[in-house]
Amino acid sequence: MFIPCGESIPDLTNFTLLMPAVSVGNVGQLAIDLIISTLDMSKIGYFYTDCLVPMVGNNPYATEEEDSEELSINTEVYALPSKKLVVLQLRSIFIKYKSKSFCEKLLAWVKSSCCARIIVLSSSHSYQRNDMQLRSTPFRYLLTPSMQKSVQNKIKSLNWLEMEKSPCIPEISDSEICIRIPGGGITKTLYDESQSLNLHLSFSAVFCLFHFVSEQDLTCPRLTPV
């Protein structure tokens, strides 16, 4: 799945993987673009996958004319070794019924690369918030159980709110409650898959950060997570 730019596969042991969910407003992808550009991260490879719609374009981070001749594709991987940070950028949508397969392959790659954790930048439809969410901050987070101990105190100091559970069927108030992320793309699938594979993965640590947004106003949401 992962194809390195160089002759050897880079060592990503204990790196943090930062990636977007292809979600409402493309908030995660826009934030990832800002991170890659601001930190001047180097491209180390790409994913060869049939799970996303193929695309090709010019280098989005070109600063000189010669850089603009480089091509960019739908899934690329960037790294900043000094910060032990690796970033996966997704630039196209998932092919129908392929998102679960992508999550499984991604988690297998993370395991083989010995990454320490995954941070997913995502978003959710603002118009589907409940009364409590309407009266509070537009940010929410979601943690896998294995990540609770290591970051829970830090998150509490930031006064962030955990994603609330809500009725699985919104129209039926007394239906079973679950975590719903409308418009969140692969976020919920990746979260669930990481937990179902808990016994087989050395990390199984996924942190998801959400922003409730609408399609019309994305300037503030894409800047705030960064």
Image (tube, grey):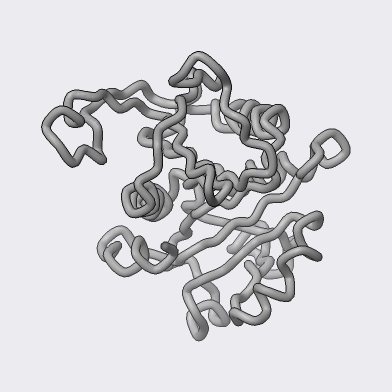
Q: Is residue 101 above or below residue 30?
A: above
Task: State whether residue 218 is above or below residue 32.
Answer: below
Q: Residue at x 67, y 40 (%)?
A: 115
Residue in front for this viewpoint, 50 or 176: 50
Residue 52 x/y as whole percent: 44, 26
Residue 23 visible here:
yes
x and y, in percent, of residue 37 in the image? 32, 48
Q: How many marks?
A: 0
Q: Nearer the viewer, residue 167 or 172?
A: 167
- Residue 55 lies, with reference to residue 88, above or below; the image says above
Q: Residue at x 81, y 39 (%)?
A: 202
- Along the horizontal axis of the image, is 147 left or right of 160? right
Tell me if 120 is positioned left or right of 165 in this view.
Answer: left
Quadrant containing the C terminus is bottom left
Q: Let me know if residue 25 appears in the view.
A: no
Q: Quadrant of the N terminus?
A: top right
Extreme bottom residue here? 135
Q: Is residue 81 left or right of residue 55?
A: right
Residue at 45% from the left image edge and 66% from the top image edge: 212
Residue 162: image location, x then y, percent: 65, 70
- Comparing 148 with 54, the one in front is 148
Q: Position of residue 208 (x, y in %)?
A: 59, 56
Q: Residue furthest left?
A: 65
Name which residue lies at 18% across and 41% down.
63
